[in-house]
Structures are given as C-alpha cells and as structure tokens.
Image (tube, helix red, strand yellow):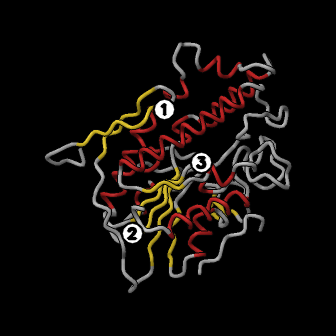
C-alpha cells in the first residue's frame, strides 16, 4: 500500500470538435479540443518514465535543497516526492521558476525548452502552468501597491474592472488556448502518456477574510483575489477535461493553510516568508501536500 506523504514532515483531421465550457464569471470559455485517445500503460517490464513540466509552483524556489540555480528548483518539490513514492519511476524534472507556456517551446536560461523532455516512451507527465501567463506576479504587486489607497475597500478590484470588463477574467480566458496548445503538444510527443494538469493551491483565506499588513491587500480585495484564483483553476480543470488530461485539485487540500495563517500552520508563505520558500509560494509542507494530491489522482483509474 502506498504510504501517505506527511505534510508536516484541429490536431488536423476530418472533424474539429469545439466544446463550449461552463461560464467563468459570466464569460463563456470556449476551447477547441483535439484530445487523442487515452492510451497509456507501459506494462511492468520497464521503469515508468515521468516528466514534470511547470513553473515556480512546481520547481519549489528557495526550498532546500536547491538543485538547479537557473530554475530555482528543489529536490523536495512535488515531482521529486511523487517519483520517490512510486517504485520504479525515473523522473525528468524540467520545471523552472518564471516559466510561461512559451517556455514549453523556448529555452529559459540554461533550461532547454521544457517539451524537449517529453519523448515517445514517456509514461507520465505532470504540468502546472498558466499562472505566469495570467500575470500572477504583476497582479500581486499591483494589488499590494493600491491597498494603501483604500484599506477597507477594493481598490484592486476597481482597478482591474475599470474598463467595464474584469481584466483578470479576460487574462484567464486568454490563457486557456495557450494551455490547450501545451496539452496537444504533449499528446503529440507522447501519445501513450498519462497527462495530469496540476492546479494551483489556496493562497488566500477561503472564507474571504484578510490579514493586512502580513499580506498587504485591502480588505475587500481578499475575496476578489480568492475568487480569481478559483476561476484560474476552473479554467485549468476545463481545459484538461477537453484535451485528454486529468486535473489534480491542490486548492481544496490546502484550504486553511494559506499565507494568512500562522507560520506553523501555513503551507503557502506570505510576501515576507518565515520558512524557506519564495514569497506567495508553497513551502516544503505545501509541496508535500501537492505531491499527495498527485499521488491520489494516480491511484485512480485513468478516466474515472
């Protein structure tokens, strides 16, 4: 029995299927789906070839021990923990802090294009991408800067909706086809691989409460940003479903351990981390919880 990780320790063809997904905050998310057949399973005669793609939430910046300075990648990130838990798994982790979907095809410093690691004999791929395409870092900076103008209000929400359209919802919608393109490329390179899209964890209190100045957002911007994070994950879930991939929910397992919680209880560090981690990123406990979520998904039969 698998041990539980302890958090405390079109494709061209004759037809093109266009699926209209559920509305995201009133906007319809439409993704062209060209999912290949879900044929995976490498048998038991060789080791499982696992490739991890992703951004800093995958890489684990500042978490000891850092094994790639260019990408700020830790050997205690969730791909490393998943591989260690699954006997006979060979991990190729090419996740890199700061990566967008473009870095799937483009080198990032000394890190080659991430999709280069995916080969025809790849059995398992996890991919956690889209946060930087969405503008995660810029949004945090903007909301922190605006908070002092109206600490009890929602200056960040007003800023991003001043045109009459929620720019953050638009950012999410614009990111959807980019993630779709990544998944299609993975399937094309590794047609038999099981592909898991890993969502993002819960950064802010799920109940909408705030914790200024530890996290310097205005009071009513906390629920706005919480909802925006949920919309980003909804998009990833839908894109995965429409493109022959499985979604791994890391939000629910991390509720109650966001960056507003005391150091002993949080799995996401605030803008001034108390544990080794990048600001607004998972610490070692957070990476362990995400690993457990991936392992639980892998225990389920593909397609169920």
Of the two numbered discs 3 and 1 in the rendering, the one whose residue sits closer to the viewer: 1
Residue sitting at x 30%, y 57%: 188
Local packing at callout 3 (Cα closer than 10 Å; few below 14, some 14-19, many 20+) is many
The crowding category of the residue bearing disc 2, from other C-alpha atoms within 10 Å (few below 14, some 14 to 19, many at least 20), is: many
Residue 217's place in the image compared with 67, above or below, is above
Q: Residue furthest top?
A: 163
Q: Report the residue at 79% width, 33% height from top.
A: 210
User: Observer-nearest residue: 59 or 237?
Assistant: 237
From the viewer's perspective, is residue 267 above or below residue 172? below
Identify the mark at residue 24; answer none if there is no mark.
1
Q: Which residue is mark 3?
A: 200
Task: Name the spot of residue 96 as percent of width and height, x first.
Answer: 56, 53
Q: Nearer the viewer, mark 2 or mark 1?
A: 1
Q: SS class of the residue under badge 2? A: loop
Helix or strand or loop: what does disc 3 sit on? Answer: loop
What's the residue at 36%, 34% (across, down)?
30
Q: Residue at x 51, y 28 (%)?
A: 25
Task: Say which residue label 2 marks.
Answer: 122
Q: Position of residue 63 (x, y in %)?
A: 72, 59
């Amino acid at each position: 029995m698998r041990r539980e990780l302890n958090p405390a320790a079109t494709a061209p063809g004759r037809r093109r299927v266009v699926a209209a997904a559920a509305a995201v905050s009133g906007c319809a998310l439409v993704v062209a789906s060209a999912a290949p057949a879900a044929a995976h399973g490498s048998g038991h005669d060789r080791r499982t070839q696992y490739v991890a793609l992703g951004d800093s939430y995958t890489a684990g910046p500042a978490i000891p021990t850092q094994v790639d300075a260019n990408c700020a990648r830790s050997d205690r990130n969730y791909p490393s923990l998943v591989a260690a838990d699954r006997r006979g798994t060979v991990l190729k982790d090419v996740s890199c802090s700061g990566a967008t979907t473009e870095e799937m095809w483009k080198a990032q410093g000394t890190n080659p294009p991430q999709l280069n690691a995916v080969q025809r004999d790849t059995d398992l791929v996890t991919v956690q991408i889209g946060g930087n395409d969405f503008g995660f870092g810029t949004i945090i900076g903007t909301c922190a800067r605006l908070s002092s103008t109206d600490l009890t209000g929602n200056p960040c929400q007003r800023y991003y909706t001043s045109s009459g359209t929620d720019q953050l919802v638009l950012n999410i919608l614009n990111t959807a086809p980019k993630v779709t393109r990544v998944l299609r490329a993975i399937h094309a390179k590794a047609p038999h691989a099981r592909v898991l899209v890993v969502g993002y964890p819960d950064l802010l209190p799920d109940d909408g409460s705030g914790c200024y100045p530890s996290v310097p957002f205005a009071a009513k911007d906390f629920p706005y940003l919480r909802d925006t994070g949920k919309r980003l994950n909804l998009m990833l879930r839908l894109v995965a479903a429409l493109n022959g991939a499985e979604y791994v929910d890391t939000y629910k397992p991390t509720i109650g351990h966001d960056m507003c919680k005391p150091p002993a209880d949080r799995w996401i560090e605030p803008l001034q981390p108390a544990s080794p981690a990048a600001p607004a990123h998972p610490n070692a406990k957070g990476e362990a919880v995400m690993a457990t979520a991936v392992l639980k998904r892998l225990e389920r039969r593909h397609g169920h």
